[in-house]
Amino acid sequence: VYTQTAAAKDNFQKAEIELHLGDFGEAIKYYGKAISLYPNYANAYYGRGKAYMHLQKNMDALNDFWQLVKIDSTRADGY
């Protein structure tokens, strides 16, 4: 059975590949899909924040990093 969590992980993995390849717009799209399937996906917020930073969308990045910290306050990479 293919669950929402599995689908979120698949989208996260696609996003990670796109981020690594430098296609930040596609990465943001896949991170967004992962987040819509699993709203507390801290790693997806972090990845999307990094992608936004590459596109100099600093407020969007800040919002994602803030969401990351709200989900997991122990994540130093969100500060």
Image (tube, grey):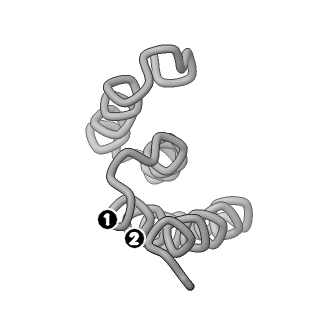
At x 28% / y 36%, what residue is drawn? 63
Instruction: Depth check: give the residue in front, 23 or 46.
Output: 46
Q: Which mark is residue 15?
A: none
Give the vertical position of 49 relative to 14 (above or below). above
At x 31% / y 34%, what residue is drawn? 67
Quarter of the view holding residue 23:
bottom right
Give the vertical position of 48 relative to 20 (above or below). above
At x 66% / y 64%, what residue is drawn? 22
Instruction: Depth check: give the residue in front, 30 or 9.
Output: 9
Q: What type is the residue that disc 2 sits on?
A: Lys
Within 10 Å of disc 1 (Cα), the crowding (few <14, some 14-19, many 20+) is: few
From the top left corner, tell me how far across and down residue 62 is, in percent: 33, 32
Which SS class for mark 2?
helix
Q: Which mark is residue 33?
A: 2
Q: Is 26 placed left or right of 10 in the picture?
A: left
| For the residues bearing labels 2 and 1, Cβ distance under 8 angstroms | yes
Quarter of the view holding residue 37:
bottom left
Instruction: Depth check: give the residue in front, 45 or 53.
Output: 45
Give the vertical position of 35 relative to 57 (above or below). below
Give the vertical position of 24 relative to 51 (above or below). below
Which SS class for mark 1?
helix
From the top left corner, tell me how far across and down residue 13 is, in percent: 66, 66
Q: Count how many numbered circles sit on residues in the image.
A: 2
**Alpha carbon of mark 2 to alpha carbon of mark 1: how far?**
5 Å
At x 46% / y 51%, what residue is drawn? 48
Quarter of the picture holding the N terminus: bottom right
From the top left corner, tell me how far across and down residue 56 is, in percent: 41, 45
Q: Is 46 placed left or right of 35 in the picture?
A: right
Q: What type is the residue that disc 1 sits on?
A: Ser
From the top left corner, tell me how far across and down residue 34 is, in percent: 44, 65
Within 10 Å of disc 2 (Cα), the crowding (few <14, some 14-19, many 20+) is: many
Q: Which mark is residue 36?
A: 1
